[in-house]
Amino acid sequence: MFYTYILFSTTLNKYYIGSCQNIEQRLQDHLNSRSKFTKVAKDWELKYFETFPTRSEACKRELQIKKMKSRKYIEALIQEKS
């Protein structure tokens, strides 16, 4: 199983969109400064995720969300899932 996920940092007031195979391990990587973009904050929270059968589909969805370049779109996704 592969995932597309959205994290949020209150400190930075920013979202991070990514994809991975092990969502728990990836979140720990972000929290422990093992990711270049997210190492500036230590308060990343998993806000949203989708599951996919292949890495290709997860990456495609990640790029689709990133191309929207819209905080409103990201927050609408999170709100829908809640």
Image: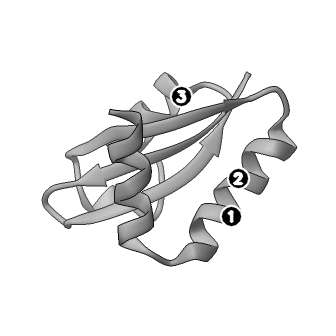
Q: Residues within 10 Å of mark 1 (few under 14, many from 20)?
A: few
- Residue 59 vertical placement versus 36 (above, below): above
- Quadrant where the N terminus lies? top right
- Residue 60 vertical placement versus 12 (above, below): above
Local SS, label 1: helix
- The coloring applied to the image is one colour
Residue contact at pointers 2 and 1, CB within 8 angstroms: yes
Three-letter code for the amino acid on which mark 1 is drawn: Gln
Lower position in the chain sequence, tag 2 or tag 3? 3
What residue is pinned by disc 3? 23
Quadrant housing residue 63: bottom right
**How far is the residue under mark 3 from the one under mark 1?**
19 Å
What residue is pinned by disc 1? 64
Left/right of residue 40 with respect to residue 80 in the rendered view:
left
x then y, percent, for residue 65: 59, 62
- Along the line of sight, which residue is nearer the eye, 81 or 1? 81
The answer to whether residue 33 is seen in the rendering is: no
What residue is pinned by disc 2? 61
Please tell me how many numbered marks the rendered image carries. 3
Local SS, label 3: helix
Left/right of residue 23 with respect to residue 41 in the rendered view:
right
Nearer the observer: mark 3 or 1; the answer is: 1
- Residue 10 vertical placement versus 42 (above, below): below
**How far is the residue under mark 2 from the one under mark 1?**
5 Å
